[in-house]
Image: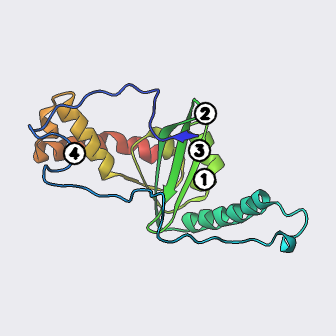
Amino acid sequence: MIIATDQNRKKSKKKAKNDKKPGDQKRHTGSNLKPVDDPDKVKVIKVDRRIIPKGFHYQKVGYERVESFEQWIKKQLITSDLIHADEIGINIGGKRHWLHCASNASLTLFGPHKKRGTEAMDERGVLPFFNGRLCHDHWKPYYHYRCIHTLCHAHHLRELERAWEQDVQQFAFDPLMAQKYFAEFAATYQPVVSTG
């Protein structure tokens, strides 16, 4: 069983931005499909087991088909001009794992691993062979790969939100101060990125 929330990490409460309660608007009724005891239509799909070849193993065939599709996705990602990469902590069987993701405009490859860093990314088989533009958060292991690095603005915005809400950093609220902060950040880390 995979749980997408990280049960091992303590969550900090964010400051309320306004007096509105979280959730839908008051007059929004919402809707969803409810299961019923007597559905309007039931379609039964019969399988004639006599036509299934002896020794046919559904899981093995399924795995082989997924494996070839995964190899195709990896090839498409490796030859892309731009891919995005990220990872998030997940819980598998009560133990901490990392769900690694690599994507372009039309394809996404997910894969869990016990480790977070380059060992896991190397085993996924995309980043070690990628030569295009890699968009990521500024986590140091991504700079291990020989490609053009681009930093993700969604991560920048999260960092600014955290700096404003938890550290009460004024620059995070003021766009001009934030621009100056990122310019200083880029000037500081550009030599590190250039030297590998």
Sequence-first disc among 3 and 4: 4
Distance from the alpha carbon under mark 1 to that under mark 3: 17 Å
Residue 85 vs 162, above or below: the answer is below
In the rendering, which numbered label is found on residue 112?
Answer: 3
Mark 3 Cα within 10 Å, few/some/many (few <14, many 20+)?
many
Is mark 2 in CB contact (under 8 Å) with mark 3?
no
* Comes first in the chain, label 2 or label 4: 4
Give amino acid for label 4.
Answer: Gly
* Residue that badge 4 annotates: 23
Marks 2 and 3, the one that precedes in the sequence: 2
Disc nearer the start of the sequence (4/1): 4
For the residues labelled 4 and 1, the Cα–Cα distance comes to: 42 Å
Q: Total label count?
A: 4
Residue at 64% of width from left, 68% of height from top?
72
Mark 2 Cα-neighbour bin, 10 Å: few <14, some 14–19, many ≥20: few
**Labelled disc at residue 93:** 2
| Number of residues whose C-alpha sits closer than 10 Å to that of mark 4, classed few (under 14), some (14–19) or many (20 or more) | few
Q: Secondary structure at mark 4?
A: loop
Badge 1 or badge 2: first in the primary sequence: 2
Instruction: Work out whether residue 90 or residue 19 is closer to the camera in this orientation and state it.
Output: 19
Q: Is residue 186 visible?
A: yes
